[in-house]
Image (cartoon, rainbow, N blue to C red):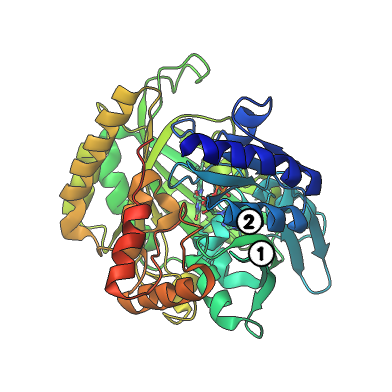
Amino acid sequence: MEMMRSSLILSTIEALQARLKGSAFIPGDTGYEQASQPWNLNFNHRPTVVVMAKNTRDIVEAIRFAGLNDLGVAIQATGHGVSLAADNAVLINTSQMQDIRVDAITQTAWVEAGVKWGSVLEQTQKFGLAPLLGSSTDVGAVGYTLGGGMGWLARKFGLSADNVNFFEMVTADGHVVHASQEENSELFWALCGGGGSFGVVTGMEIKLYPVTTVYAGNLMYPIQSAKEVFVHYREWIANAPDELTSSIVIMNFPPFPQVPDFLRGQSFAIVRGCFAGPVEEGEKLLQWWRQWQAPIVDDFKGMPFSMSGMISNEPNDPMPGQVSSIWLRELSDEMLDVMIRYAAAPSPLTVVEIRHAGGAIARVKAGTNAYGNRDASYILETVGITPTPEASDVCHKYVKEFKQALQPYSTGGVYINFLEGAEKWEQTKLAFSPETYQRLRVLKAKYDANNRFRFSFNIPAAVNDATQMSLENRTKPSSN
Ligand SMILES: Cc1cc2nc3c(=O)[nH]c(=O)nc-3n(C[C@H](O)[C@H](O)[C@H](O)COP(=O)(O)OP(=O)(O)OC[C@H]3O[C@@H](n4cnc5c(N)ncnc54)[C@H](O)[C@@H]3O)c2cc1C
């Protein structure tokens, strides 16, 4: 039966290839590995077919092919945010869809599915405009936005998902639809923060903001001062203006030769931030720190926003990593003690960061779109470098224990963009209010009742109980 199935696929793959502007690869083809490999080397997709899509038409063909062969459909722009391994699936790789069109008059940009934030930043800064990108310029704009998208301008201008004018999407039955406030508004509501499971977004039009210079950087203090630094930070942000989006970080620099001498193998308590207002005001804000205790490193300065990727300085090269997160209600003394205890070396974690949310994110009324947990103020993210299965295992267990210890201070919600792997799939529900999750399930039934897009957020279609059980059985996560 299995053999018949593979020969069936082989016979139709040639027909698929003939209809594509891009390419289709099956296991064994040159190009298959490269097209399937996510940025995060901890994951390894083994799709039945991978389609390097060049345009919307290619995506339509790939989805129809999946339908004919009863395969799932997974999507990859960069592989920064993998949920489930794309096995028994057509993996649509959008990385060659690179169109960006900036309209300086309306302050908007059309961004195609495969575009990374770095390219959008480069194109928009030419006009003195900025997109609402995140801390890494290497992340895909569409994938980031579908999960919410919280970056250095978030407290001032909100989430990326709150700043989309419209999406173009290919549905499970291969139709191209537009979603905006006016057209398919329920789908638009879902894609803004609850997306990724309803179809393949081919591109989106986003709002841009006039930001050219920011006052941004890092203050690095000895790890021994972590508690006083973080308590001081709590006071700093208590009345901080929305122009300031900031975070506190415990960083354990790995003992790698490429790390500068004075950082290699060392741990630091870091205050990181970006002030999107006049440079002089940013400088004034920093006096709070400079008059307090001299940090080991102080690189806060006025900088072009085009350099904003330097603030967090995250790696662009593919790496094996494990990310997790938890929303916190407070930065109480007790919570900070837990953070420091688990984050500072010896710890299998390289980075533990708490980002300050609120501001413009919280000013949007809950339920305006699918994005949940708007009222939560602090998102704690953990990052471990996990080059071996043993390291992954150690990190996984450690983070589980760490998050357990943080439970008393947590809102109970999750931020879907800062989860990955099976955890992202298992905890999807916690990213939304119960009403929103149910509404997403109803929409899923309308757009993808057979759960073809099952490798993203776990949103089972709202159906009767018997159908529900059979759907759940066929969508259990496979381990990677
Ligand atoms: C180094 C690093 C820094 C980050 N910084 C931030 C940050 O500052 N703020 C923040 O909010 N998040 C951040 N993230 C998280 C990131 O936004 C998510 O992981 C996001 O899902 C990545 O999208 P991608 O397209 O790059 O990755 P991919 O792995 O290619 O895609 C992730 C998922 O997005 C969905 N998707 C992607 N493209 C499409 C499409 N065209 N149509 C439908 N679904 C699609 C799919 O479900 C896919 O599985 C960061 C992640 C990393 C690794």
Residue 342 lies, with reference to residue 262, above or below; the image says below
Residue drawn at (18%, 42%) of the image: 401
Could you tell me residue 124's position as x and y percent?
77, 57
Disc 1 designates what residue? 174
Q: Quadrant of residue 212?
A: bottom right
Tag on residue 259?
none
- Measured from the top left, where is residue 286 in percent x and y? 49, 52
Q: Position of residue 231 (x, y in %)?
A: 27, 52
Give the quarter of the image for residue 378.
bottom left
Q: As rendered, which of 438 and 414 lies closer to the eye?
A: 438
Question: Residue 63, percent across and down?
Answer: 63, 56
Which tag, 1 or 2, sits closer to the chain's start?
2
Question: Disc 1 residue type?
Answer: Gly
Question: Which residue is rendered at x = 20% and y = 59% of the image?
Answer: 409
- Cα distance in 3D space between marks 1 and 2: 6 Å
Q: Is residue 235 visible in this depiction of the protein?
A: no
Outermost residue toward the bottom in this view? 182
- What's under tag 2, amino acid-wise? Ile
96 horizontally vs 186: left or right: right
Could you tell me which quadrant the C terminus lies in? top left
- Residue closer to the observer: 93 or 77: 93
Q: How many numbered marks appear?
A: 2
Is residue 440 something that shows in the picture? yes
Q: Secondary structure at mark 2?
A: helix
Q: Residues within 10 Å of mark 2 (few under 14, many from 20)?
A: many
User: What is the secondary structure assignment of the residue under circle 1?
Assistant: loop
Residue count near mark 1 (Cα–Cα under 10 Å), binned few <14, some 14–19, many ≥20: some
At horizontal 79% and vertical 74% (from top left) the residue drawn is: 106
Residue that label 2 marks: 63
Quadrant of res 203:
bottom right
Q: Nearer the viewer, residue 110 or 134?
A: 110
- Note whether ligand 1 is within 8 Å of mark 1: no
